[in-house]
Image (spheres, rainbow, N blue to C red):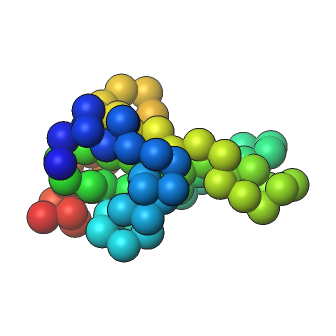
Amino acid sequence: MTIYKFAKLSFLEKKQLVETKAIFLDNYMDSQSLINTYFFDGFFVEVVMNLSMGAIIEIIPFLHGYKIDKKNINDYLKMAC
């Protein structure tokens, strides 16, 4: 699946794919959210959970950029393959 096809899926379809097929890489927290990072079919996915609600509020696919620490990207890719 391409990142573009993933982006067009419904929220529930994205959630199901991440839960069943994606590889968990890392997570971090900010003041209101827990952010889990996954690798899926050649791209990364951030799943943002609101801590006060205890619910997923966003599922964001991305290829590269500020969302992932560039010095660790090769380590993440090695883990995923």
State the residue lying farthest toward the top: 65
State the residue lying farthest toward the front: 10
| 36 up-or-down from 31: above or below | below
Q: Using the rendered image of the protein, determine whether residue 29 is visible from the camera's viewpoint.
A: no
Query: Residue 80's x, y, as percent?
Result: 21, 63
Query: Residue 22's x, y, as percent?
Result: 32, 64
**For the point 36% across and 36% down, which residue is it?**
8
Q: Quadrant of the C terminus?
A: bottom left
Query: Residue 5's x, y, as percent?
Result: 26, 39
Left or right: 59, with 40 as reference point: right
When asked about the image quadrant of residue 75, the answer is bottom left
- Compare residues 71 and 20 and report the one nearer the observer: 20
| 42 up-or-down from 8: above or below | below
When asked about the image quadrant of residue 44, the answer is top left
Q: Using the rendered image of the protein, determine whether residue 22 is visible from the camera's viewpoint.
A: yes
- Compare residues 26 and 44 and report the one nearer the observer: 44
| 69 up-or-down from 75: above or below | above
State the residue lying farthest toward the left: 81
**For the point 31% across and 43% down, which residue is it?**
6
**For the point 46% across and 39% down, which residue is it?**
60
**For the point 16% across and 60% down, which residue is it?**
78
State the residue lying farthest toward the bottom: 20
| 74 up-or-down from 27: above or below | above
When asked about the image quadrant of residue 77, the answer is bottom left
Q: How many marks?
A: 0
